[in-house]
Image: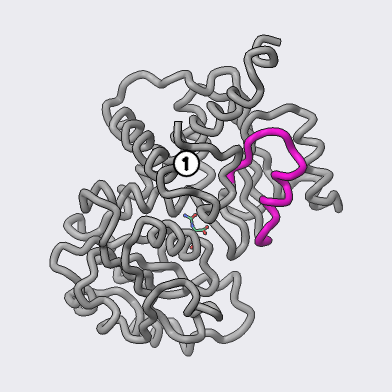
Amino acid sequence: MTFRQQHLLGIEPLHPTEITTLLDLADSYADHNRSGKAHRDVLAGLTQINMFFENSTRTQASFELAGKRLGADVMNMGMQASSIKKGETLIDTALTLNAMRPDLLVVRHPHSGAVDLLAQKVNCAVLNAGDGRHEHPTQALLDALTIRRAKGRLHRLSIAICGDIAHSRVARSNIMLLGKMENRIRLIGPPTLMPSGIADFGVEVFESMEEGLKDVDVVMMLRLQKERMDGGFIPSEREYFHRYGLDAAKLAHAKPDAIVMHPGPMNRGVEIDGNIADDINRSVIQEQVEMGVAVRMAAMDLLAQNQRAARGPKEVMA
Ligand code: NCD
């Protein structure tokens, strides 16, 4: 067994062999999900709590479905309506939930580092479903699985990540994962949307889509994360689409078989032309959603296995 983590807090602590182990298992779950066979019971008897302190459609639904497919008891905490609104601290909420003895805690939080902090206070496995601008590990893993299935490999590919890099946890996790697997990463976007210290990431940076997309295998578009912007980062959405929105003319600079990705939710006509997003010959956006369920099944399966091993047979019996 080459997956040694107790939690899935980010891509940063993962060894490449751990990434491969998780993707291999997710790959078999993806095939299993397509076969329409009966659900498995690898998480039977376990309780999964989803705590989303930030709105989410696909990630929360995907974690919920993944848990249910594996037989877990899944509970969604509506954190918007919870005691947080009444002034309870994150730590108090964590301790309260911990006392209910969940096995898996899936957390999304608007502040970078909040999920790591929470993981230190509970004794179940914690999965980060996105914390501020920091990490979104299951998104990077599902992107990796989508790329591996489309391209037949996950190394020595040329991958462009485009748009609002500065505010994106998806970009951070992807840069780390794709870098660990020895791919060439290009970041394309206006300087105002590039994080500071980008030179340390081992990536190439471009201001022009036409130059940056030249001969790439994968084009990953990002949403303009307006909710994280506290000023004018772009002149106007129209101007942004003109310079950075992915349309057929810009995509023509990539390899003829380059795939187009987007983590969703998409702003059609802002960062991507709707026709490109819907082009089944180029866009793998729906596959990304499909692989999301498989990757989350694999992540929870592996963490539950490690939890069982750590608790030992005695506690399992009790
Ligand atoms: C991303 C997120 O929440 O970070 N979405 C997602 O998880 N599918 C990206 C985004 O919000 O733009």
**Kind of residue at disc 1:** Ser
Asked which secondary structure carries label 1, the reply is helix
- Residue at the spot 40% in from the left edge and 83% down from the top edge: 240
Which residue ends up furthest to the left in the rendered image? 256
Stretch of the chain drawn in magenta? 111-127
x%, y% of residue 154?
Answer: 29, 53
Image x and y of residue 73, in percent: 59, 24
Residue 154 on the magenta segment: no
In front of the other: 259 or 124: 124
Query: For the point 81% across and 47% down, which residue is it?
Result: 91
The stretch drawn in magenta includes residue 124: yes
Q: Give above or below for 108 relative to 172.
A: above
Q: Residue at x 23, y 70 (%)?
A: 216
Residue 129, percent from left and from top = 56, 49
Dividing the image into 4 quarters, which one contains the N terminus?
Answer: top left
In the rendered image, is residue 274 in sight? no
Total numbered circles? 1
Question: Would you say 259 lies left or right of 65 here?
Answer: left
Residue that extends furthest to the bottom in the rendered view of this protein: 235
- Give the labeled residue for mark 1: 62
